[in-house]
Amino acid sequence: MENEVEDAVDVALVAYREEGVWQLTALPSGVGEDVEELERALRPFPSDCGVIGMVAVDEDFFVLARVSGTHTRLLLSDVTAIDEWPLASSVADELDLPDPEEDDEPQPAGDMEILADLGVTAIDLAVMLDDPDAYPDEVLGDIAERLGFGDAYQALVD
């Protein structure tokens, strides 16, 4: 299963600001397994505004994680991924979300204000997540653009 999940991860990166300048780097492949692994991978990075983890899986969903000290904020782009992917399931457990019903529509869960202090409001995220034709890595690219590191994001993803 582990190789299957690793192969399904489309994007796994960390963004952090050091002395006001955004830095981006790829995350290890194992972060697609669970939220605890993602948190562990993010904690070593310094940041003056919290460390942001961006993981997109199998053109299906993404997870945004923001770590500041011992506090972690999470956003899952689509609750219907909970039954299919270990990372989505572990985020749901962390957020104490109920299991989705079979007829549930795709919808985000978690902290929609996760990036509000950086200029990406809950309304901005809702609009981006509401586009049925946008792939998760594209939405993350839009978020990166709004945060000011779109070019660096594209360079890492391409």
Image (cartoon, rainbow, N blue to C red):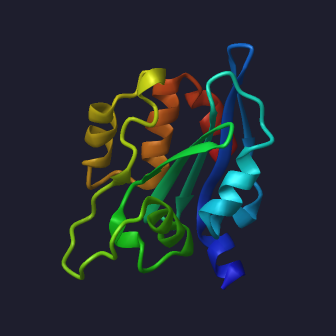
Q: Give 11 or 47, whichever is nearer the viewer.
A: 47
Where residue 34 appears, as percent x and y from the top left, is 62, 67
Q: Would you identify the image quadrant in which residue 36 lies? A: bottom right
**On screen, residue 92 above or below 52:** below
Q: Is residue 110 left or right of residue 132?
A: right
Q: How many marks?
A: 0
Residue that protrudes farthest toward the right in the picture: 44
Q: Is residue 16 left or right of residue 148?
A: right
Q: Residue at x 68, y 30 (%)?
A: 16
Q: Would you identify the image quadrant in which residue 6 lies? A: bottom right
Residue that protrudes farthest toward the bottom in the picture: 1
**On screen, residue 91 above or below 19:** below
Where residue 121 appears, as percent x and y from the top left, is 35, 29
Q: Residue at x 28, y 41 (%)?
A: 126
Q: Residue at x 48, y 43 (%)?
A: 140
Q: Residue at x 40, y 71 (%)?
A: 81
Where residue 90 appears, as percent x and y from the top left, is 53, 69
Residue that protrudes farthest toward the top in the picture: 20
Q: Give 117 or 31, whichever is nearer the viewer.
A: 117
Q: Is residue 105 visible?
A: yes
Q: Is residue 158 visible?
A: no
Q: Give 151 or 62, whichever is nearer the viewer.
A: 62
Where residue 54 appears, as percent x and y from the top left, is 58, 47
Q: Quadrant of the N terminus?
A: bottom right
**On screen, residue 71 above or below 28:** above
